[in-house]
């Protein structure tokens, strides 16, 4: 304990909780994960502190004790955000479950539930990923874990520093854990007798009284409290991360409220609900900000691009215990003999201590990079990868790798030679029937639009690894026949004479299209999704994406599911702008918003005549002669810093 006696530690703990109370005051109290989403205005980076119902402080004062501390982006070059990390702990809204193999917090809670309740989940905590059938079997336990974690109140400390081993976030996290830990010490603020952590199979959790394993056996530097206090003071007087639009799947009634929390006598409580229309935006939002639009005018989207055979000549590689290079291929037994190289598959075992995939994941978790591995986006020579990162940010770019699966752009990736290309040498060629425990690092609960650039050979893997993605997915293709059996994807034909690696050209066009919108249009005029081509049967120029509606109409439909079809609509620019703006403010995709209105029109049973109107652009209420009036939240062009409710659909309906 670095010479610190228990009496000193008690005083340091009391000071720690005084700082926590000030943090709670400045952020208007703790959040609850069940009420949080990526549409809230989170700080880019920070440290989070979880408490737990029933776990009260005893020696240090009143209120709940902190039971879990964490941060993110401690590896140099990482661009992950604090919400990325919190969302992994929360799990996706749609299923109510999650992925404990991507969150050690979830893994620890799950092991405790198994022991406490006598559950049978033999594959829990085994491996960095698992086949679909195992994940389905574990889904009931994942839901129980989500229920527990989502109910835990937490606070966020904003620390927007660079990623790396010298990060202030790492300093605060490490010392806070060491201070609060009861591991091999006289217990202070001991857990309650019914604390779930006592059932965890990890001794460090049980003995530390924390849902943490790292740093619990370390000493702490008392000077970190000065830094902690300064960081809280720098946050300002109002740092509440308000959601702009809290719901995505359905319109929200104007009288629904957002929970406002406060600190009373050192304990966390929930105050009354405040109507949405009275909430003011936090000081982090720019005037007139629209959900889904970044400060430079670009949209919040994510892109996936397939890997490439041509990699950097100095790419780092894995090394076996004898110091030999490891080259990952699809079929090692067919690889040419080479005494200086060990051929292996990513899922081959390494000396009986796990497989290469697990080894790579552990390697990425450490701060050092002795093998000089490239981040995935830098591993490939083509400039398209850098262009995507430059345009959309490394946190929004993912690589679909035939060897490793769907990996983040910043994931350190070794040299490998695995491909889906049918023309590749047999030992490099991955077959559809081959079993791979692919990574799937895309946050499934993310609701941002997702765009894929890749050949038809990579589409089955993209479809498999994004089945549970919550946002809308758009797939560009160049084949004469649209791809089939794509789950929930909108297909966009990209016409070009380029036949080999055409997706690089498509990615370049997409980047330029996005840039043209952000450079030339005002925020209110930017579309909610990529510039989608209008239906046409006319010949197209090189590099122009179109929906292919010529020939067999059924082949051009969007196979979201059985008996479904995608229909393109051309309309006036003003009408499209208003439609996209309203959908964006409501937190809906444009397609979802259209389907709601169309369904109401069909359900009305009457013969209706649709007419466009420019009056909606003024934001003024319009008296409608139809009984069918939908309440929507309208973005007011004149006072674009607030959200209001109007009875103004972008279409006017008259009964014949």
Image (cartoon, rainbow, N blue to C red):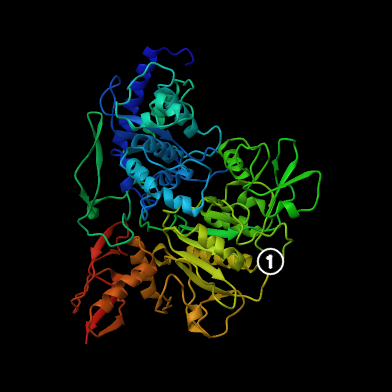
The one of 537 and 162 positioned closer to us in this rendering: 537
Image x and y of residue 252, in percent? 26, 59
Image x and y of residue 635, in percent? 31, 63
Question: Is residue 458 placed above or below 558 in the rendered structure?
Answer: above
- Visible residue check, residue 238: no
Residue for point 60% across, 60% down: 433
Question: Is residue 542 placed above or below 290 in the rendered structure?
Answer: below
Where on the picture, by quarter, is residue 503?
bottom right
Where on the picture, by quarter, is residue 610?
bottom left
Image x and y of residue 126, in percent? 51, 41
Mark 1 is surrounded, within 10 Å at the Cα level, by few (under 14), some (14 to 19) or many (20 or more) other residues, namely few
Residue designated by label 1: 422
Secondary structure type for disc 1 = loop
Question: Is residue 506 placed above or below 397 in the rendered structure?
Answer: below
- Visible residue check, residue 549: yes
Q: Answer left or right for 539 relative to 293.
A: right
């Amino acid at each position: 304990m670095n010479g610190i006696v228990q009496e000193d530690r008690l005083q340091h703990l009391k000071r720690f909780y005084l700082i926590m109370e000030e943090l709670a005051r400045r952020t208007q109290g703790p959040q609850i994960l069940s009420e949080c989403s990526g549409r809230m205005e989170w700080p880019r980076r920070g440290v989070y502190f979880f408490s737990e119902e029933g776990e009260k402080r005893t020696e240090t004062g009143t209120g709940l004790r902190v039971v879990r501390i964490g941060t993110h982006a401690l590896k140099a070059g990482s661009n992950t955000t604090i919400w990325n990390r919190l969302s992994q702990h929360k799990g996706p809204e749609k299923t109510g479950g999650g992925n404990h193999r991507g969150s050690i917090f979830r893994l620890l809670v799950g092991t405790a539930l198994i022991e406490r309740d006598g559950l049978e989940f033999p594959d829990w905590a085994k491996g960095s990923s698992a086949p679909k059938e195992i994940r389905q079997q574990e889904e009931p336990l994942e839901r129980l874990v989500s229920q527990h974690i989502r109910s835990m109140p937490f606070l966020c400390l904003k620390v927007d520093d660079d990623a790396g081993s010298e990060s202030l976030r790492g300093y605060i996290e490490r010392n806070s854990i060491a201070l609060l830990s009861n591991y091999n010490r006289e217990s202070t603020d001991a857990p309650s007798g019914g604390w779930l952590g006592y059932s965890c199979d990890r001794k460090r959790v049980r003995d530390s009284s924390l849902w943490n394993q790292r740093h619990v056996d370390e000493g702490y530097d008392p000077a970190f409290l000065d830094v902690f206090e300064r960081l809280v003071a720098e946050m300002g007087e109002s740092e509440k991360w308000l959601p702009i639009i809290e719901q995505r799947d359905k319109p929200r009634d104007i009288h629904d409220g957002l929970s406002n929390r406060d600190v009373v006598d050192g304990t966390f409580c929930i105050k009354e609900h405040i109507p949405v229309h009275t909430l003011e935006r936090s000081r982090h939002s720019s005037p007139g900000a629209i959900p889904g639009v970044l400060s430079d005018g670009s949209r919040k989207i994510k892109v996936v691009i397939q890997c490439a055979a041509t990699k950097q000549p100095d790419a780092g590689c894995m090394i076996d215990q004898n110091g030999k290079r490891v080259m990952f291929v699809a079929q090692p037994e067919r690889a040419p003999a080479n005494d200086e190289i060990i051929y292996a598959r990513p899922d081959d075992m390494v000396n009986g201590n796990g497989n290469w995939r697990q080894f790579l994941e552990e390697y990425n978790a450490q701060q050092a990079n002795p093998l000089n591995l490239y981040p995935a986006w830098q591993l490939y020579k083509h400039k398209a990868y850098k262009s995507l990162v430059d345009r959309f940010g490394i946190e929004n770019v993912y690589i679909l790798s035939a060897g490793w699966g769907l990996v983040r752009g910043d994931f350190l990736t070794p040299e490998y030679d695995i491909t889906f290309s049918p023309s590749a040498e047999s030992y490099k060629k991955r077959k559809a029937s081959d079993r791979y425990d692919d990574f799937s690092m895309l946050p499934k609960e993310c609701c941002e639009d997702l765009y894929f650039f890749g050949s038809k050979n990579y589409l089955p893997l993209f479809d498999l690894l994004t089945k549970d993605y919550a946002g809308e997915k758009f797939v560009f293709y160049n084949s004469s026949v649209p791809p089939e059996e794509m789950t929930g994807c909108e297909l966009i034909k990209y016409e070009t004479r380029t036949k080999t690696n055409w997706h690089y050209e498509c990615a370049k066009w997409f980047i330029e299209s996005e840039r043209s919108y952000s450079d030339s249009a005002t925020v209110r005029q930017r579309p909610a999704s990529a510039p989608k081509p209008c239906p046409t049967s006319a010949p197209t120029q090189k590099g122009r994406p179109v929906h292919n509606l010529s020939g067999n109409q059924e082949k051009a439909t969007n196979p979201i599911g059985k008996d479904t079809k995608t229909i393109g609509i051309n309309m006036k620019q003003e009408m499209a702008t208003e439609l996209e703006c309203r959908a964006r403010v409501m937190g809906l995709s444009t397609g979802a918003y259209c389907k709601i209105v169309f369904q109401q029109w069909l359900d009305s049973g009457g013969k209706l005549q649709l007419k466009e109107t420019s009056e909606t652009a003024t934001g003024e209420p319009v008296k409608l002669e139809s009984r069918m009036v939908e309440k929507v939240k309208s973005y007011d062009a004149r006072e674009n810093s607030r959200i209001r409710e109007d009875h103004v659909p972008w279409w006017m309906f008259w009964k014949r």
